[in-house]
Image: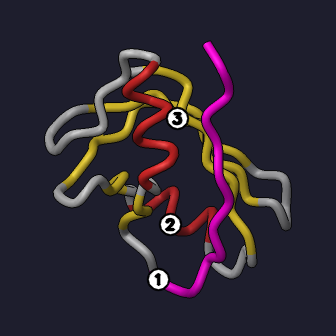
Amino acid sequence: MRLIEWEVAEDGYEEQIIIPKEQRDLAAEEGIGTENKQKLAVRILNLNTGESYTGRLAITGNHQIYLPTEIQQMLKESGKVRIQILGG
């Protein structure tokens, strides 16, 4: 499986992170669905502190990964966040 990752700027309070079309297409080629109500295995990394979360998170409407409150707190004021899709 090839690495599917991207970085986003953390701009305050975010409950969801949009999966860009290029990463959705790569995931689909690997047989990983990114549709509403599915779950993804992901790694989310705070590039400022090095803190990370690895686990399964839900996909909400519009191809977005839902971030529970504890992950939102980990990412608060991080500047940049790296997201990796590890599997479906």
Inter-mark Cα distance, 2 to 1: 7 Å
Label 2–label 1 contact, CB within 8 A: yes
- Of the numbered discs 3 and 2, the one sitting upstream in the chain is 3
Disc 1 is placed on an element classified as loop
Q: Which residue is mark 1?
A: 13
Give how far across and how far down residue 41 sits, in percent.
46, 27
Give how far across and how far down residue 5 sits, in percent.
64, 42
The kind of residue on which mark 2 rests is: Gln
Give how far across and how far down residue 22 sits, in percent.
50, 48
Residue at (69, 81) in percent of width and height: 77
Inter-mark Cα distance, 3 to 2: 15 Å
Q: Which mark is residue 27?
A: none
The kind of residue on which mark 1 rests is: Tyr
- Of the numbered discs 3 and 1, the one sitting upstream in the chain is 1
Q: In the image, is 31 to the left or to the right of 54?
A: left
Crowd rating for badge 1 (residues with CA inside 10 Å; few <14, some 14–19, many 20+): few
Quadrant of residue 53 in the image?
Answer: top right
The magenta region covers: 1-13
The kind of residue on which mark 3 rests is: Val
Residue 10 covered by magenta stretch: yes
- Between 8 and 52, the residue placed more toward the observer is 8
Q: Which mark is residue 72?
A: 2
Quadrant of residue 74 in the image?
Answer: bottom right
Quadrant of residue 4 in the image?
Answer: top right
Residue at (74, 78) in percent of width and height: 79
Q: Which mark is residue 42?
A: 3
Q: In the image, is 69 to the left or to the right of 35?
A: right
- Mark 3 or 2: the one toward you: 3
Disc 2 is placed on an element classified as helix
